Amino acid sequence: MPVRRVLAHDKVVNNAERVALQRGPVVYCVEWPDNEGNVLEIVLDDDVALKAEYRKDLLHGVTALTGRLAGGKAFTAIPFYARANRDRGEMNVWIARTQAAAQRISTGPIPHDWEALGPLKASHVYPPAQLAALGDNRLPKSSRDLSGPHFTWLYHVGGTEWVQKTFAEPTEVSSVEVYWLDQADKGPCHIPVSWRVLYRHDNAWKAVENTGPYGLDADKINRAEFKPITTTILRMEATLHEGSSAGMHHWRVR
């Protein structure tokens, strides 16, 4: 099967002067361990010859794409399905074809404006459109039910993640409701280790004085109550299990 270079539609401005690689039905990506730690600055010229090479020693056996970039630097791409198995680092699917395209990403932080939707914002959300699920007031049949819209921090594992709501004017709130998503042993999202509620006060985050527990039960609404506070931004912060992500079917501020 030949290696195909795929271009995005001209209206996808973020992919201008970029190329994706495909062999048969398999889309490829470049990851940091195979490319000296830095993949966002790679420039894959159109005339770079690429060959498919089965690597038994790589990721339990995958067919990689290899070549030599301008200047002689080795280039390796792996199947997209095999990504994110070797610790945290850079990954890229749409590879720059020109130095100008590489420079547009590599010279500064990637904007995260897409991680906001109206008054809702998150530290991370996958996919972005699912942020709306937090406010649709639809409840699932169970924590494992993924048939409807749901929110996840998928591909962020361990550590601390958050969601927050901004109010148009100072608002009094006294409780937060959460219906956790839990895939148990069938997926990467599990109910977190713990969570808490904070609010914005004097340009700093301050924990609320909760009057009840922060529930971690599956298949039900977990309601956390606290002494009423008045704020313009309320945040829920969750501590994830090591090696796991988390998500929610429902999140409501009252």
Image (cartoon, rainbow, N blue to C red):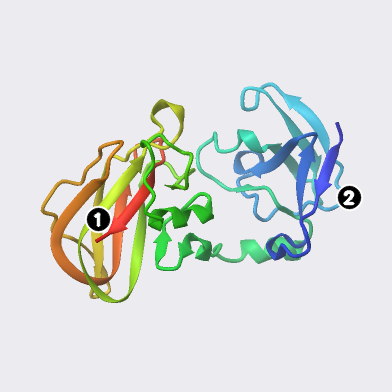
In the rendering, at what x and y percent does residue 46 appear?
86, 52
Mark 2: give few (<14), some (14-19) or many (20+) Cα within 10 Å.
few
* Three-letter amino acid code at the position of disc 1: Val
Q: Which residue lies furthest to the bottom in this view?
A: 169
Q: Residue 47 carries which label?
A: 2
- Left or right side of 86 for 222: left
* Three-letter amino acid code at the position of disc 2: Asp
For mark 2, give the secondary structure: loop
Q: Label 1 belongs to which residue? A: 176
Mark 1: give few (<14), some (14-19) or many (20+) Cα within 10 Å.
many
Of circles 1 and 2, the one toward us is 1
The residue at 75%/54% (across/down) is: 43
- Left or right side of 163 for 23: right
The residue at 65%/27% (across/down) is: 58
Mark 1 to mark 2 CA distance (whole Å) = 56 Å
In the rendering, at what x and y percent does residue 139 appear?
36, 45
- Name the quadrant containing residue 193: top left
